[in-house]
Amino acid sequence: MDEILRLFPDDIKDAIQHKVHKRWGELQEIRFRLNQPLELIYDTKTEWIHQVKPKQKDGIFVLNQLSSFSLYRMEDELREGYVTIEGGHRVGLAGKVNTLGGAVKAIKHITFFNIRIAKQKVNAAAPIAPFLYRDSSYMNTLFIGPPQTGKTTLIRDIVRLIATGWKSIPAKKVAVIDERSEIGGSIKGVPQHNVGLRTDLMDACPKAEGMMMMIRSMSPDILVVDEIGSKKDVQALMEAILAGVIVICSVHGQTLEEIKKRPSLQPLFQQDVFKRFVLLERQQQPGIIKEIYDQNGISILEKERCLANGVDRSTSIHRHHYMDRF
């Protein structure tokens, strides 16, 4: 966790190390707010370091660490409201916003920081993979869930599985457009997370442009992007599908019905692009699957569960009795 601890002044770093100790694997977020106690969010609980209340000089220290003492280098990130650091960890920023012509120009007087810790959970997607593969082919799949439900963690692991192969399923060529550097956690273009043997990754590239670049240059079987939403994203996805490429992507949302009403996503539903929808639910521990739907919105997770055990009413794929079959 050196890439995270280096962000903080020594006294705050020491307090975090002492409090977290050997629980780094459970830590999800460090919330750093000026003049407020430091907040540590774990998988199952929240803790506070009350003796640590960051001052303005501490916030300036963090900003200097993030920007290597050059805020000009962070101009694009300040418009977006986050910075991705080594290891794929994302630092969210909030404070006073400067606008130009009604659009956000930058965040000024940054007083709130949210350090979201990226973790690779190998085989997190193993129970899901069989649902996405039928008749010797993967299917266009959309992961749906609110923030912090583990969409990126599952996307990263499904990339690894597809690009390496699992059980008797051969590996496929996978192209990843990692706009926020969260899937691969790349440093100078080299992924720090295991994304599989046959994965090619375009780091810090806008999704729409990156998808077209990868189709032209890397001839992928599978195209993977995280957090789609704009009309440009959707247009690029449609182009990829028309080129014969399978797409796997994610989107922020609570339910499938909500996503279907989103105007920018309408072309995807009008063309019945997706054959699988994986719905995640918000719990303290990320990566909990609530439902898996087919293209008609019918729960195939329930169907499989009933075939395996008619009295199992669990809603989490991690607790199903049929998991040994995967």
Image (tube, rainbow, N blue to C red):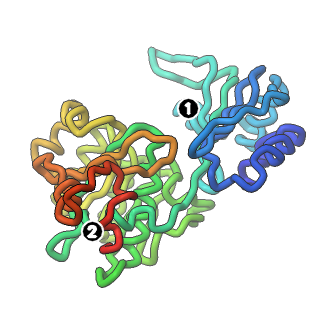
Q: Is residue 133 above or below residue 15?
A: below
The disc labelled 2 sits on which kind of residue?
Pro
> SS at mark 1?
loop
Residue to which mark 2 is pinned: 130
Which numbered dot is residue 81? Answer: 1
Q: Nearer the viewer, residue 301 or 241?
A: 301
* Label 2: few (<14), some (14–19) or many (≥20) C-alpha neighbours in 10 Å: some
Q: Say left or right for 296 vs 218.
A: left
Is 302 placed above or below 81 here?
below
Q: Secondary structure at mark 2?
A: helix
Q: Estimate the spatial distance between the alpha carbons at disc 2 and disc 1, rounded to whole Å.
A: 37 Å
Residue type beneath disc 1: Gly
Residue 203 lies, in percent from the top left, at 50, 56
The part of the image, by quadrant, that contains residue 8 is top right
Quadrant showing the C terminus: bottom left
Q: Nearer the viewer, mark 2 or mark 1?
A: 2
Q: Closest to the observer: 258 or 46?
A: 46
Q: Position of residue 97 (x, y in %)?
A: 58, 18
User: Hey, which residue is sitting farthest right in the picture?
Assistant: 11
For the question of whether residue 245 can be seen, the reply is no
What is the quadrant of residue 11 in the picture? top right
Q: Residue 100 placed where, x, y %?
A: 51, 17
Instruction: Residue at 49% x, 56% y: name it.
Output: 183
Camera-nearest residue between 267 and 25: 25
Residue 270: tell me if it is visible.
yes
Residue 13 found in image quarter: top right
